Amino acid sequence: SQQGEEDPQALSIQEGENATMNCSYKTSINNLQWYRQNSGRGLVHLILIRSNEREKHSGRLRVTLDTSKKSSSLLITASRAADTASYFCATDEEETSGSRLTFGEGTQLTVNP
Amino acid sequence: GAVVSQHPSRVICKSGTSVKIECRSLDFQATTMFWYRQFPKQSLMLMATSNEGSKATYEQGVEKDKFLINHASLTLSTLTVTSAHPEDSSFYICSAKRRGLWSSYNSPLHFGNGTRLTVT
């Protein structure tokens, strides 16, 4: 079953604006990962944040993790048209300990030029 | 590095035939490969976990006799959809976990580009 819930389901912004996507989960985790998927393609790993980390940056990406609220957010700053894609969070649950990831429902981001 | 090649990217087949999809890790060894199915505008649903040299572990509701998985080497896993029906039409994606990382549960997955299967 998919434990991750993401919101919004769809987000449309203008180039240059920031995009924030949220993910909530239900169980204890080892880490939480964010992936990007262009239409009709596989997923590309963006960033991994461990359960003992609260914030992580990679280029224009900023990820936060609040294990007390079981939630994470992905912020894309200064968005570009090329950022248009679906973004998924995925949790590596303690119970399954690295043997599988559980994906959220995804956020479809559209960045208008 | 960490490239996963999935082939074919698209396949159209007639109802009742079987289709084989290959997933190869090109520049690393993968102890574990995962097979997912994705319907339009939906998330990835894990179908099965494939470990090299052992039988695949299937998720609840996935028919193992219909979706045959073989992980014969550390770089290759195959998914065969047997006696395909139109309802099997979907996007199938494989991913691989790299062997040998010190902390395997804090490592990302590497995905193939998916296979669009259409059964007519």
Image (spheres, coloured by chain):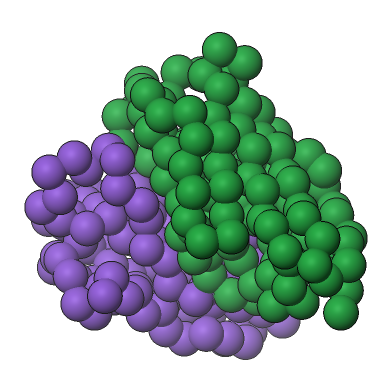
Is residue B86 visible in the rendered image? The answer is: no
Give residue B82's position: percent from left, percent from top: 47, 68
Task: Name the residue located 47 percent from the left edge and 42 percent from the top edge.
Answer: A56
Which colour is chain B painted? purple
Give residue A93's position: percent from left, percent from top: 41, 28
Task: Name the residue located 73 percent from the left edge and 73 percent from the top edge.
Answer: A80
Compared with residue B33, is residue B14 higher up or lower down, i.e. above or below? below
Task: Please name whichever residue, B90 or A43, is drawn nearer the observer in this view of the structure.
Answer: A43
Q: In which quarter of the image is residue B14?
A: bottom right
Tell me if B31 is positioned left or right of A69 in this view: left
Task: Name the residue located 52 percent from the left edge and 19 percent from the top edge.
Answer: A67
Is residue B99 visible in the rendered image? The answer is: yes
Instruction: Name the quadrant of the N terminus of chain A.
Output: top right
Task: Name the residue located 59 percent from the left edge and 75 percent from the top edge.
Answer: A41
Give residue A111's position: percent from left, percent from top: 82, 69
Tell me if A61 is positioned left or right of A76 in this view: left
Tell me if A27 is positioned left or right of B108 in this view: right
Instruction: Name the quadrant of the C terminus of chain A.
Output: bottom right
Compared with residue B26, is residue A88 higher up or lower down, i.e. above or below? above
Report the label total: 0
Compared with residue A91, is residue B70 higher up or lower down, i.e. above or below? below
Tell me if A103 is positioned left or right of B30 in this view: right
Compared with residue B41, is residue B25 higher up or lower down, i.e. above or below? below
Task: Please name whichever residue, A107 or A72, is drawn nearer the observer in this view of the structure.
Answer: A72
Task: Please name whichever residue, B59 or B27, is drawn nearer the observer in this view of the structure.
Answer: B27
Colour green, chain: A
Give residue B57's position: percent from left, percent from top: 32, 42
Q: In which quarter of the image is residue B112?
A: bottom left
